[in-house]
Image: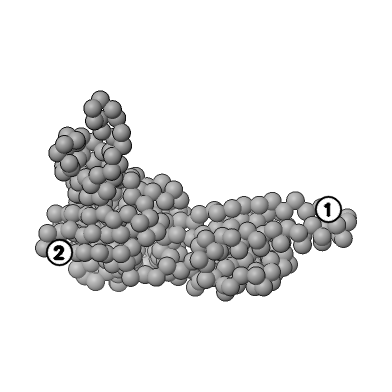
Amino acid sequence: MKVIAWDEKHGRMLLRIEGQDDLWCLYNILDPGDMVTARTLREVKVNDKSSRRPMTLKLKVEKVEFQPFTEKLRVRGIVVEGPDRFGVVGSHHTITVGEGSEILVEKEKWPRHHLKRIFKAASRKPIGILLIGIDSDEAAFVAPHDYGFEILAEARLNLPGKHDPTKRDEALKEKIAELTAKAKELAERLNAKAIAVVGPGFIKDMLAKELSSNIKARIYVDSASSGGYQGVREAIKRGVLRRMLSDFSIVEEAELMDELLAHISKSDGKAAYGIDEVKRAAEYGAIEKLLVLDELIRSPDPDLRREIEKIIEMAEKSGAQVKIFSSLEEPGQQLKSIGGLAAILRFSLNLES
């Protein structure tokens, strides 16, 4: 993401979207009532003929929709500014935002955690990473994003039975060559600087060796009990790839949830969860790390949103780290199961009512 201009006095920020993770960032900072201005296509009637015309419109945001891996974000709202000759002011419209889009966002008040999120996204250099899970049955090619893991391709190996070792070896070599070609194609698309190959047995090592000879990227190899997508997820959950993926929010979320659950299981008084407990911890200035589910800050209930924003502000004023969790992945679902809001505390507190 690129911050083209930031007018702090008037609460206006002009952004350029440079990738899918930027769309996820934008999705989490746009609220109902915000104003957005962007180029768009609008169907209008001219001389009794309908046509789609390019124009710049300003909307008052009502709803924001994000579908993972579609590379598009849809901002729905009421047109408040537009070309007079088309009479679009006051009507509903949807602006579609994608890679390369420029969008002006205006807020009456910019929460500090929104600004931190944007400037972090703007300063981060994209690191292309390809994850491959493989065993004797299947292979999966996976790309990590801030909001989850995208399965780029899957393949069945369909190897002959072990009763004919020669035929099986020949088929395996052919399949490894096919998978190497696919990995090369995907690595070029992602501009991948690193590739991880995980799975049981020797097949992962065969593939890694071929990748090393054919692709200019650092190759990591590690074990998992299975191949495919589940093998990739297992390797990440066990911490095998966390150093490699440390720049991705989804890994940080998993580590924070592990830390929170450890405190809960020990009953050491250093964990709070649910709005009431977390609010009291914030009032004491006790929060070290605040965990917030994205669904709460985008809640259609304005009173709930204001309460969450107030808790975030209190936590930030006391120096807490604030992390917004994606509801699309396992750590976010774990957080949702305990109310969507939790905190790791600097010191033990008895927060029971």
Residue 65 against residue 226 in the figure, above or below: above
Quadrant housing residue 341: bottom left
Tell us which disc is closer to us: 2 or 1: 2
Q: Is residue 323 visible?
A: no
Judging depth in this view, the residue of 200 and 341 nearest the camera is 200
Give me the C-alpha separation between circle 2 and circle 1: 67 Å
Q: Is residue 14 visible?
A: yes
Left or right placement of residue 83 versus residue 328 in this view: left
Residue 278 against residue 218 in the figure, above or below: above
**Residue to which mark 1 is pinned:** 161
**Residue to which mark 2 is pinned:** 8
Mark 2 neighbour class, 10 Å CA radius: few under 14, some 14 to 19, many 20 or more: few
Quadrant housing residue 301: top left
Left or right placement of residue 125 versus residue 288 in this view: right
Task: Name the residue located 27 percent from the left edge and 59 percent from the top edge.
Answer: 15
Can you tell which mark lies on residue 5? none
N-terminal-most mark, 2 or 1:
2
Residue 326 against residue 8 in the figure, above or below: above
Q: In this figure, what is the number of numbered marks? A: 2
Q: How is the image coloured?
A: one colour
In the image as oriented, which residue stretches furthest toward the top? Answer: 48
Under circle 2, the secondary element is loop
Mark 1 neighbour class, 10 Å CA radius: few under 14, some 14 to 19, many 20 or more: few
Three-letter residue code for mark 1: Gly
Judging depth in this view, the residue of 213 and 227 nearest the camera is 213
Task: Name the residue located 33 percent from the left edge and 63 percent from the top edge.
Answer: 1
Three-letter residue code for mark 2: Glu
Task: Name the residue located 33 percent from the left edge and 50 percent from the top edge.
Answer: 97
Spot occupied by residue 352 in the image (x, y as percentages of width and height): 29, 57
